[in-house]
Image: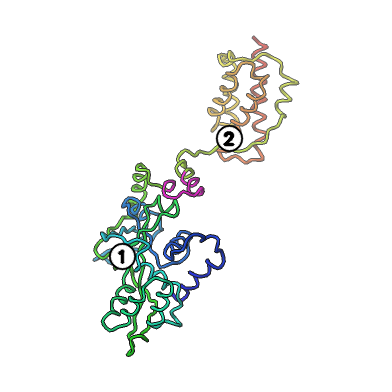
Amino acid sequence: MPVEHKLMQLPLLKVPHEFTGISNNFEIMTKYQHYGMCTRLLDLKTNPLVALYFACEKYGNVRYIIRDEDEEIEEEAYGIVYYNKEYPVTARDYKVEIISLLSYFDLSKNNTLDFILEQLEKRKVITNKEKNNWLTEEGYKSFVDIIQNNYIVSPSYSNERLSRQSGMFLLAGCFNFNRAEMLSKSTIEKSYKDLRKEFEDTFFYVKGENKKKILAELDTYNINEATLFPELEHQLNYIKTRNKSNVYLVSEFIKYTDEILAIVDKEYNVKIDDDLLKNIDFSERINEYLKKKYPSLSDKIFEEIKKCVSKIDWYNQKSALSALKVGIRKLFLNDGSKREELAEDVNDIVKKVLDVAKQVSYKE
């Protein structure tokens, strides 16, 4: 890329303390990659199940053309797993060091073969013997072969994420060589290449509709966001996502008031206990009232009343009355009642229950 040399150099100037103790250009590049910088590295995994996890990440719907049919479908994008049986080289391999160092060069300016080889020698990446050999008609093709190849590189596990993900990298060469009449003045320039060609005929697809199921199965093998990403944000997101199925709606907030409870203290001083539920007169009068005023909810409201009446001395237990009001209010809200009408209706029902309870108690 035209600005690659700037992207490689500026972080070293802006935050040099972040790279203290890292002298290898490839290792610096892997740190850039870890923090999202554009580099010529492609993330690979040595663990096929980890690779499958990333292939199953949700992408979004895309359009597919059905073969032999004049029809398009839109569905979750397929995932692709590429694989390669080549053995990796180490980050200290001189070929890796050559490609890594070239990424720091501005090849739009001084890009002749003699200048580049001189810079590589000056930085002790190659020897004087290699430089002189690569400037000859018999030897220059060896250098061209190095800079036009891609390398699978095994890095030092300098960060926990790289270790957890069994990470490796594909280091792209992708340099064009323009031969000049005088070999030493031949030029080298950066180019681009479709790296999928490195994995021709060694890949398989993952259907979008199967991604969720595969991720669930991988989770049973302890391959998930929490195990692959050590950072706290990923740990918390995994916990949140894993517990979504246990989420349920709590009751709507209702501001507590003592209005009806004050009426209880002033006007009702009879002993009302769970025997009231056995009183046929109480049940009949309350049910008749409810069916007349609230026919669609009468049975559900009476169930709420039974819950509270079953608590001994419930008229002295303000929490029980408060619970009754909340329960009745929820029934009205779920039934689509208007909020401004709720308070009056709820209070009317509670007062009616208290009145009937008092009457049947005195009668007895």
Compared to residue 54, the image places residue 334 above or below, namely: above
Q: Nearer the viewer, mark 2 or mark 1?
A: 1
- Main SS category, magenta section: helix
Q: Please give the residue where the numbered disc 2 appears in the rendered image.
A: 330
Magenta-span inclusion, residue 230: yes
Residue under the point 45% across and 40% down: 245
Q: Residue at x 67, y 40 (%)?
A: 340
Q: Amino acid at mark 2?
A: Lys
Label 2 and label 1: CA atoms lie apart by 50 Å
Is 111 magenta? The answer is no
Which quadrant does the N terminus fall into? bottom left
The quarter of the picture where the C terminus appears is top right
Magenta stretch bounds: 225-238
| Label 1 secondary element | strand
Q: Is residue 165 left or right of residue 271?
A: left
6, 76: nearer the viewer: 6
Residue 119 percent across, percent down from the top left? 42, 77
Which residue is rendered at x = 31% and y = 66% of the image? 196
Q: Which residue is mark 1?
A: 65
Residue 208 at x, y percent in the picture:
34, 55
Q: Amino acid at mark 1?
A: Ile
